[in-house]
Image: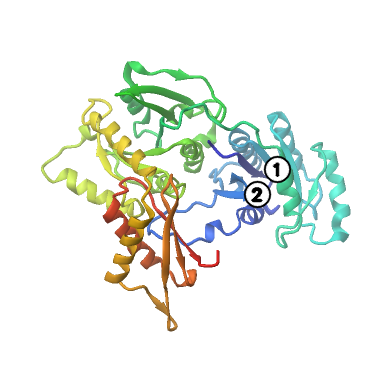
Amino acid sequence: MRKPVVAVVGRPNVGKSTIFNRIIGDRLAIVEDKPGVTRDRIYSSAEWLNTEFNVIDTGGIDLGDEPFLKQMRQQAEIAIDEADVIIFMVNGREGITSADEEVSQILFRSKKPIVLAVNKIDNPERMNDVYEFYSLGFGEPIGISGSHGLGLGDLLDAVVKHFPEELGEDYDDSTIKFSLIGRPNVGKSSLVNSIVGKERVIVSDIAGTTRDAIDAKFTRDDQEYVIIDTAGMRKKGKVYETTEKYSVLRALKAIDRSDVVLVVLNAEEGIIEQDKKIAGYAHEAGRAVVIVVNKWDAIEKDDKTLREFEQKIRDHFLFLDYAPIVFVSALTKQRLHTLLPVIDQVAENHTMRVKTNVLNDVIMDAVMMNPTPTDKGRRLKINYVTQVAIKPPTFVLFVNDPELLHFSYKRFLENRIRDAFGFKGTPIRIVARSKSE
């Protein structure tokens, strides 16, 4: 099931990024246990009233040398395309400007739910500054202060009320849902067509998909699959379609709905930073990952080529050291038959559960081999370990003090778990909690 999407829209200097950071809390401050994850502050996850959702900061969408008003219009259009609810931010100190009115006209035509947030209302005496914004026609404006965090609860209450009631899907739990993500021209469309061939069945726009998403449902060897196709999502003729960050937004909705994500690379062009950004989102979302190198037929090869390319991938994607790599050609069907078995395997590992007693034996053996770290004379003590979730497999360590679990020791424990149980293709989450929790 995909999460609702909220976009923060408004002219520059109204505090969009400050509110974006307030909404997502400390999620971007979390230290990633694995090196090499490329972060992009345009998009992140948040939670309010036990409801998870994704947030877009349109101020982070760089549209190059476009004129000021044109940039704003295009950023608003991106928000309209991607969001279920839009937060329209204005500056309470400056009043309504012509730029505010320009954005409001675009949002009016969207027919999307709009929540009007009047920022920089830093104390009760400034509440009178809110009232003039009624004239924009979006109902009751909500006074907030990004710098002080005031009014944020009221704002999020209003946002959550507008979330769609139905974001579920009709697919059976045994159906493996996978998506192909990657920058344009890596061959996603060709791969989709090659995988399903004549069996391709177009499923009409089910709840939870974007308007122009296409799901391809097919069966192979009694296993049902759904390909969540991002390849056909491009909207020609729009300037912002060429921006890297926009293609990331498109990929993120597909990642949300997937069990397995195929990160598609172009063998001819090699690896660029954009590939790492998109792959980083799949990793952080906790999805099973397969790295697919397409157009392998176009490469001149000797007996070292495959091994060298694989090493290059490992060097660039350090955070995906668990992901298998498959070399294929959609054009010639070379090695294509190897792809579905790998998808089956990583999907199975993504849902694997480990018996608690066996898990504890592995962890205690690991501690005997490499004793737990100390800090200022205090040693980490692991009392008990249990698996609490799948998709991805998540393990809780009950310890004397969670602060004593250094990320390097956590990585050591992850490696021991992988040595014992495999978990190829899926990230693993390890969480430390005190005995009292």
Label 2 and label 1: CA atoms lie apart by: 10 Å
Report x, y in % for residue 201.
41, 17
Q: Residues within 10 Å of mark 2 (few under 14, many from 20)?
A: some
Of all residues shown, which one is farthest toward the top?
198
Of badges 2 and 1, nearer the viewer stands 2
The answer to whether residue 31 of the structure is visible from this angle is yes
Which of the marked residues, 2 or 1, is nearer the chain's N terminus?
2
Left or right of 396 on screen, residue 344: left
Report x, y in % for residue 138.
79, 37
Of all residues shown, which one is farthest toward the front?
357
Left or right of 125 on screen, residue 306: left
**How are the colours assigned in the image?**
rainbow
Report x, y in % for residue 272.
35, 47
Quadrant of the rendering where the C terminus is positioned? bottom right
Report x, y in % for residue 110.
68, 30
The type of residue carrying mark 2 is Trp
Where is mark 2, residue-wise? 48
Q: Quadrant of residue 330?
A: top left
User: Which residue is drawn at the image coordinates 10% and 43% (left, top)?
Assistant: 303
Residue 281, relative to residue 73: is it above or below? below
User: Which residue is drawn at the image coordinates 67% and 48% (left, top)?
Assistant: 49
Q: Quadrant of residue 319?
A: bottom left
Q: Say what secondary structure mark 2 lies in.
A: strand
Where is mark 1, residue-wise? 159
Q: How many marks?
A: 2
Residue 168, relative to residue 321: is it above or below? above
The answer to whether residue 90 of the structure is visible from this angle is no
Left or right of 415 on screen, residue 259: right
Tag 2–tag 1 contact (CB < 8 Å): yes
